[in-house]
Image (cartoon, grey):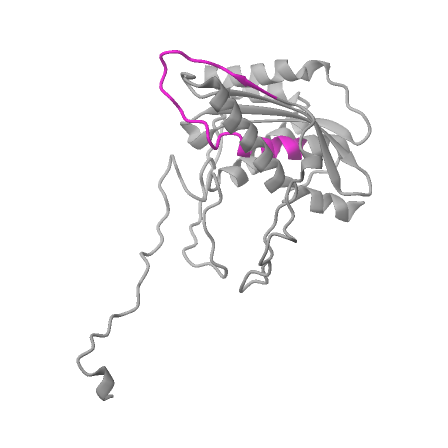
Amino acid sequence: GDLLAGVEVVPPFVPTPPKPIPQPNGGGDRNAIPLYRFANQSIVSQFLPDMPVRVSALRGLGAHLNIFALESAMDELAAAAGRDPVAFRLAHLDDPRAAEVIRRAAARFGWSRYRPRPNRGRGFAFARYKNHGAYCAVALDVERIPDEGRLVVHRAVVAVDSGEAVNPDGIRNQVEGGLLQSLSWTAYEAAGHDGTRRTDYDWSGYPILRFADVPHSVVVEVIDRPGTPFLGTGECAQGPTAAALANALAAATGVRTRSMPLAGGLATRS
């Protein structure tokens, strides 16, 4: 007791209470509000300040997950209406720049000329990052290898509008990187936990995209808008890529997978 005499006891550090990030940027609800025109829609966000496992921000925050859900639903709605997925999206948009990236990606991909084959299909998705950033549309040609749970992306075509393009090559680099990162997240990656703590502790067993599984071809078309504001590019491709992959696999297999990683779900159905 005498050793502590005169020693100031400092209380433990108390972190700032978590707070939701307001729209339009959002946090976990980023890109939860679709750009499409619907007669009736309701968006509900539930903020959870306490989680059983400590979490942090994934690149893009909730945009990757929310666009995956929204753009997968758009394909299901198009199918229910008996409409082509690209035409269905265009019919529900009144933003000309959004429509332009969709048309450019579809044209460069050859959407209208595509012919599906067994275990192979096309997928499309679109979003405007944060609903005020870059516009991005992604079209994929994907094959599922039966009994392996393995995916082959034969072609990836992206159209992006980031406003005035000061460095078009830099925009392409960012979009290509975002595309590959999202393919890895969406198809393979998952961090294990048992409800109280993580169970993965090193990279050796972590599932991730390998060189053998990268797309055989990637084309990024940059739509330059001289004199318009810079919209940023860095995280615009992750959400549309995720949904385009899910939509392509649904077209290839006839089965809609609604949870990630997609390759794990495919393996269980083989």
Find the residue positioned furthest to the left.
Answer: 6
Asked which quadrant contains residue 75, the reply is top right
Picture quarter with the N terminus? bottom left
Q: Is residue 38 one of those drawn in magenta?
A: no
206 relative to 250, above or below: below
Q: Which region shows up in magenta?
A: 219-247
Between residue 19 and residue 197, name the one nearer to us: 197
Q: Is residue 237 one of those drawn in magenta?
A: yes
Q: What residue sits 36% from the left and 53% below the top?
A: 18
Left or right: 108 in relation to 67: right
Task: List x then y, in percent, for residue 49.
Answer: 40, 56
Left or right: 125 in relation to 234: right
Left or right: 56 in relation to 214: left
**Residue 94 visible to the viewer:** no
Q: What residue sits 77% from the left and 23% below the top?
A: 116
Left or right: 112 in relation to 54: right
Q: What residue sits 60% from the left and 56% below the top?
A: 192
Find the residue positioned furthest to the top.
Answer: 226
Between residue 81 and residue 138, name the one nearer to us: 138
Q: What residue sits 62% from the left and 17% below the top?
A: 106
